[in-house]
Amino acid sequence: MIAIACDHAALKMKKIIVELLEEMGLEYRDFGTYSEESCDYPVFALKAARAVASGECERGILICGTGIGMSLAANKVPGIRCVVCSEPYSAQLSRLHNNSNMLAFGARVIGEGMARMITKVWLETPFEGGRHQRRVDMIAEIEKGSVLE
Ligand code: RB5
């Protein structure tokens, strides 16, 4: 199950990505927003991020004007590793090396074709594990207050 959420700036882009999820045969849960009426992106980022952190959804996709606000909000939820990507290389490496569990991007930054490409590669790329697991674990330690000494 993939969580997806957007704010008013990204409603049309969310529809494009929902179409992609359907093409890929992936189940999704849409956490809003559902209209172009101005709204506060942290509300919707939090709903999707909590679903990912709880395990209800395996991963999540957040779309706002830049991707930045929603990613900042999502990364406040323990267990969330949300990355803002404007090109597929970073999206792919964020899976391979960082085990990113949320992807954010900006509907005002990239076009539909690029958004589809980034999302597809991010969804299809596994985590490499190995030495990268230790580093991802260190990020979780920071959440618990460790200073990593
Ligand atoms: C909304 O105007 C805009 O601030 C929002 O979509 C997002 O880009 C925030 O980071």
Image: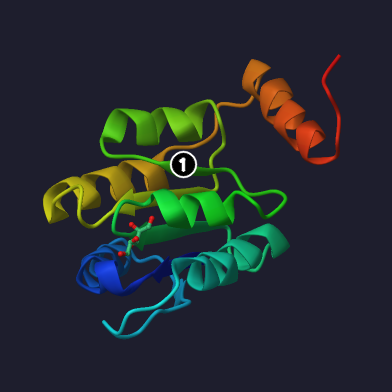
Q: Which residue is mark 1?
A: 83
Which residue sits at x=39%, y=78%?
39
Which residue sits at x=72%, y=51%?
78
Residue 67 point in image, percent of width and height: 36, 52
Q: Is residue 36 above or below residue 12?
A: below
- Tell me the quarter of the picture where residue 52 sits: bottom right
Which residue sits at x=68%, y=22%?
135
Pick the residue in front: 14 or 28: 14
- Tell me the quarter of the picture where residue 114 sits: top left
Q: Is residue 38 left or right of residue 83?
A: left
Q: Secondary structure at mark 1?
A: strand
Pick the residue in front: 103 or 8: 8
Q: Is residue 8 above or below residue 126?
A: below
Q: Is residue 71 above or below residue 48?
A: above
Residue 142 point in image, percent of width and height: 78, 33
Residue 73 point in image, percent of width and height: 55, 56
Q: Quadrant of ligand 1?
A: bottom left
Q: How is the image coloured?
A: rainbow
Pick the residue in front: 15 or 19: 15
Residue density around tag 1, few if under 14, some if 14–19, many if 20 or more, within 10 Å: many
- Tell me the quarter of the picture where residue 17 sits: bottom left
Q: How many marks?
A: 1
Pick the residue in front: 63 or 134: 63
In the image, the residue with mark 1 has its CB under 8 Å from the nearest atom of ligand 1? no
What amino acid is at disc 1? Val
Placement of the C terminus among the 4 image quadrants:
top right
Q: Is residue 14 left or right of residue 30?
A: left
Residue 42 point in image, percent of width and height: 52, 66
